[in-house]
Amino acid sequence: MKKITVKLFATLREGRGKIIEMECKEGKKIREILHDLKIEEKEVAILLKNGISSKMDVVPSCGDYLSIFPPVGGG
């Protein structure tokens, strides 16, 4: 079975881990993957698919990897 890899950064790792492998489901949008991981869209500042900026409505292919970054805090 093929999978996609989700790489989480900073605060998004809390309670989830750093790298998550998920089964490939035909037609599943990135938005739905985030929902499965209990990540709200407002928690995502940068979303990359295979290292390239992406949108929530994109459907990843098997073997793709997503990198998800929260907003940067501090100052």
Image (cartoon, rainbow, N blue to C red):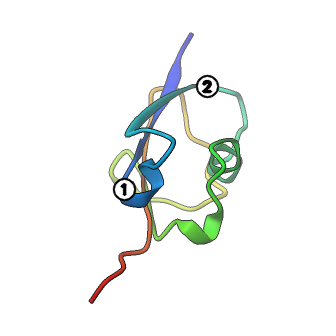
Q: Is residue 14 above or below residue 62?
A: below
Residue drawn 57% across and 9% down?
A: 1
Q: Pick out the residue farthest to the left.
A: 75
- x, y percentage for residue 59? 63, 44
The amino acid type, in three-letter code, at marker 2 is Cys
Q: Contact (CB < 8 A) between labels 1 and 2? A: no
Residue farthest bottom in this picture: 75
Q: Nearer the viewer, mark 1 or mark 2?
A: 2
Which is more toward the observer, 58 or 65?
A: 65
Number of marks:
2
Q: CA distance from mark 1 to mark 2?
A: 19 Å
Name the residue at 62% across, 55% down.
Answer: 39
Q: Which mark is residue 10?
A: none
> Residue drawn 36% across and 56% down?
52
The tag on residue 52 is 1
Q: Quadrant of residue 43?
A: bottom right
The 10 Å Cα crowd at callout 2, few under 14, some 14 to 19, many 20 or more, is some
Q: Residue furthest front?
A: 15
Q: Nearer the viewer, residue 14 or 50?
A: 14
In the figure, is residue 39 to the left or right of 54?
Answer: right
Indicate which disc, 1 or 2, sits on the residue closer to the N terminus.
2
Q: Secondary structure at mark 2?
A: loop
Quadrant of image for the C terminus: bottom left
Residue type, numbered disc 1: Ile
In the rendering, at what x and y percent does residue 23 appear? 60, 22
Secondary element at tag 1? strand
Q: Is residue 18 above or below residue 39?
A: above
At a point 46% along the width and 49% down the height, the residue shown is 14
Q: Nearer the viewer, residue 24 or 18?
A: 18
Q: Residues within 10 Å of mark 1 (few under 14, many from 20)?
A: few
Q: Which mark is residue 24?
A: 2
